[in-house]
Image (tube, grey):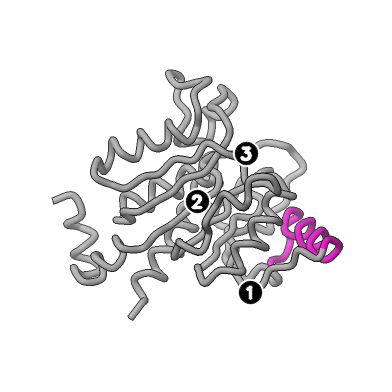
Amino acid sequence: MVFERTIQLIGQETFERLQQQRVILFGVGGVGGWCAEALVRTGIHHLTIVDFDIVDETNLNRQVVATAQNIGCTKVEQMRQRLLSIIPDANIVAIDRQYNTETAETFQLDQYDYIIDAIDMVDCKMLLLHEATKTEATVLSSMGAGRKMDPQQIRVADFWKVEGCPLARALRTKMKKSGLLPQKKFRCVYSPELSSDRGTLAPVVGTFGMTLASLVIQDAVSLQ
């Protein structure tokens, strides 16, 4: 049985509740790809993945979706195929689209139980967090995973309490200036580690993604 080990840990009733949760994930790159895989392998059955990018050879060092064979292919479709190769009966919806001011209304965010933000672009991220926090969904977000080497420094905190993250700082500044403030609290995965060199490592982005997935799973398991 595919999920026997999961059920042994959380119980049949809890597992069935987990499978009923509807999750939408924005971004299936370094952080989002690992998050998506962890969610599906743990039992999330209804997952919508959103991304507009293609696989590039520069993704090979850190993105679970990237292989030497699929360079140039649409990321979100490659991720969908990978997830279905693991759990064939999972309900995986792939949306090849960027979330921005022109497309935001095409996403029905209020139909999801969990909204996960793994977007890199500040303006798109800000808009998504503003709109997502209007819904009743649990909202989770990844802050900056680049320029970091130590996954042991990765932490979880409320957005307004994130410290030492340039992306979070930039987001808060833009939100205050634009008026696109979050409408409720949400938790973030972040790291206060600073590095003088540019770059991104698989162990760090992977841990960011796995941590996001674990927050969904722990929250769903705790539902009564």
- Give percent across and percent down for residue 207: 50, 51
Q: Judging from the image, what secondary structure is the residue with disc 1 in?
A: loop
Q: Alpha-carbon distance for marks 1 and 2? A: 19 Å
Tell me the amino acid under the disc marked 2: Leu
Quarter assignment of residue 77: top left
The kind of residue on which mark 3 rests is Thr
Query: Residue pushed farthest bottom?
Result: 224
Q: Residues within 10 Å of mark 3 (few under 14, many from 20)?
A: some
Residue 58 image position (x, y, % from top left): 59, 26
Badge 2 marks a residue whose secondary structure is strand
Residue marked by disc 1:
184
Residue at (25, 65) in percent of width and height? 15
Q: Which residue is mark 3?
A: 200
Sooner in the amino-acid sequence: mark 3 or mark 1 = 1
Q: Identify the image quadrant of residue 23.
A: bottom left
Report which residue position mark 2 lands on. 25
Which residue is at 55% across, 52% downward?
Answer: 107
Locate residue 112 relative to residue 85 in the image: left or right. Answer: right
